[in-house]
Amino acid sequence: MTQSLQTRLAVTVLTALLCVPATLQVAAESPASFSSGPPPGVENNFGFPLAFDPSKMDTSVDPRQDFARYAAGRWLDVATIPGDSPYISGIVLMTKRVERQVNDLFADASRNSPSAAKGTPLQQVGDLYAAGMDVGRLGELGAAPLMPEWERIAKIDGPKSLASAIARLELIANVPVVLGASVGRDLEDPTRYSVVVADGDLPLPALEHYLSPELAPVREAYLGVITDSLALAGVPSAEAKVRAAKVLEMESRIAGKKLTPVQKRDVRAAVQRMPYAELKAALPHMDLDTLFAELGLPTSGDVLVADIGAIRERDAMLGEYSLEDTKAYLQWEALRLTSAYLTPKFIDVQADLTRALTGQANVPKRQLVVAQSISAGIGHALGQLYVERYFPAQSRIDAEEIVRNVRAQFRKRLEQNEWLSASTRAYAIEKLDKMNIVVGYPEKWIDTSAVDVRRDDYYGNMLRLNEFGSRRALARLGQPVSEDGFADTKHTLPTVVNAAYSPDRNGIEIPAAFLQPPFYDPKADVAVNYCTLGAVIGHEITHGFDSMGRLFDANGALRDWWGPADGDAFVKRSKNLVGQANAFEVLPGVRLNGELSSGENLADVGGVMLGYDALQAYLQANPEENRKIDGFTPQQRCFLAWGQNWADKMHPGLLRTLAASDPHPPGRYRMIAPSRNLQGFYDAFGVRPGDAMWIDPAKRVHIW
Ligand SMILES: [Zn+2]
């Protein structure tokens, strides 16, 4: 259930609303960005409410000249980036609130788990938390729990034992290592499962970190992490240095062959189907039969192969490097993928790298590191406890109504669409009607009760849970398709602050933790909720109909349902938006990548537009609510609420990292860029030619 290959593969096809920067992927669960307890200012949002509030505005500014400052200027004046996070935003604040809620759950669970029945969510969450928090014991153990894995690798004496060791690493980490195979829904026929082959991910977040001359300081810091980690695990320091240099050399070679994030957006090019025999023949240095046998997979039939170029490079390197180098590399993989389950010293040594990547370097708070492992290992057990305590039934009902109304507005726009061909338009409506939009938590929880979770064996617990997740995914081959809901550790667990569209399921999941201010406020007026939560839902819906959504049909099968003319018209119409983003300076000399961010920017325009449409429809049906609140019309409050939502401050280092690797633009851009393409915004604030916020109608984007 954690990060099966399917999930890994899905990363290329799953679009999330938000980016929680993976500041550091050296540990299995990157100890994200939050650490030693929020300072008081952050705890209380610098004196402001978490929800939309006019007190955050700077009304001395003309909205037609600088809408971002107008919407959130006073908040921007006083908000500071906390020492424990590389940025501050409404999402960070929501995340901190969820962290507090979850921490309370952990505290109660670990108190009560000794008397709870074995295998229940309470026992598993409580004992896993207690085991992870026992830093005294973890410190005494040091790297000892890892040693059986290292010994296994040390004994490799040829291709067969090498393949066995690689399979073992995949099972205990639940991610592909070097080259892995798992089972996921077939991209072209979602009614059945297929074997999916992929190469292992690299620890540094972006390929540029390996390849760009300017980012040498990141590599320098990373070399330090490898060296120090190996030394902590008992490798003599001179040897650790040599090994670290070799690891970086090998990873950099792979980075040069991997598909870029933009290339991965073309799923058809990124994933190909081929007979097992053909893949085997293409990889002469890999004992694929043994790897598959260890994973319980058949060595016949077809397989789906993701990023074949990187896989070939992996194989070539197995031939070129000495067995000793390969073993050293695998030991590093075993260490970095499980170091989060060992003594916290392994996380402490990552501080310089975190600083190089994000501009901040605090060591993450222990609870958060453990919380991430719990989410990855037993996220659904935790989700059950969370929903029981924190998710009111009414929030689900209200959110479902917003979903219905936003969806209805998009249907209306599709019916009136003028640039899609008639047959494509008809199919788009069918796809929208079939889209499964769910709120809060899954119908059926994943049952981890059979896994032995002990209060005194953190490393063993996590390896058993990872292996449970890997084997559960592998066992699906040949079974009827039944997909877990709200199961993506990083994007859709009920405790994750996010919302996501999965094209390969044609479904949207809005986790329970997302339904809180500023994205949803049970006490707010409709204008605010439609242009925050409603706009988010609209954003996700339009992903089903953009350049990636076109590749997946109404059932989630990989099948391009657009004609060439539809594609040309789309590209032509989205050009304005690519141009707008390319012109935006993130930092002096660093511009947004319009191509990389065009999918997200387009979804933002669509999202705000649909939230606004749904609001207008609501006001038409309920004219008594079409009145000013705090001196602002509902239409003004709509754009203001959207703008406030995305106000943020970010360290330049992180901005630079994200501009190169994240399709989501920074908050400052999202605050205002989508609204400037919508006539409703011009009407609400009287923006005229010559105003700084004005975009000539011919240069605005008109898609939906
Ligand atoms: Zn998106």
Image (tube, rainbow, N blue to C red):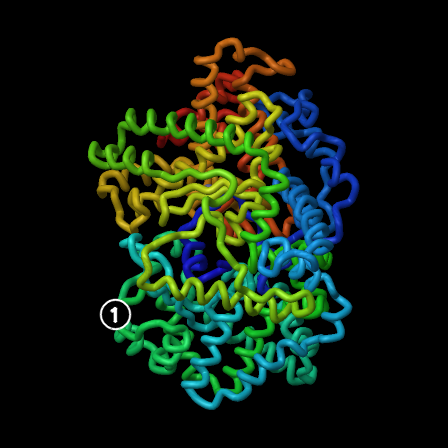
Q: Name the spot of residue 346 as percent of width and height, x first.
A: 68, 69
Residue 342 falls left or right of residue 166: right
Q: Residue at x 47, y 28 (%)?
A: 402
Residue 530 in view (yes/no): yes
Closest to the observer: 599 or 337? 337
As displayed, is residue 241 above or below residue 587? below
- Tell me residue 613's x, y (percent): 43, 23
**Residue 582 visible somewhere in the drawing:** no
Where residue 376 appears, x then y in whole percent? 56, 58
Relative to 697, say whether 24 is above or below.
below
**Residue at x 35% of width, y 44% of height:** 549
Where residue 280 sits, quadrant-wise, is: bottom left
Identified by mark 1, the residue type is Gly
* 507 shown above or below 281: above
Which residue, as the protein is rendered here, is positioned at the far top?
Answer: 624
Q: Which image quadrant for residue 32?
A: bottom right
| Residue for point 41% across, 47% down | 502
Name the quadrant of the C terminus: top left
> Badge 1 is on which residue?
301
Q: Could you say whether the residue bearing mark 1 is in a helix, strand or loop?
A: loop
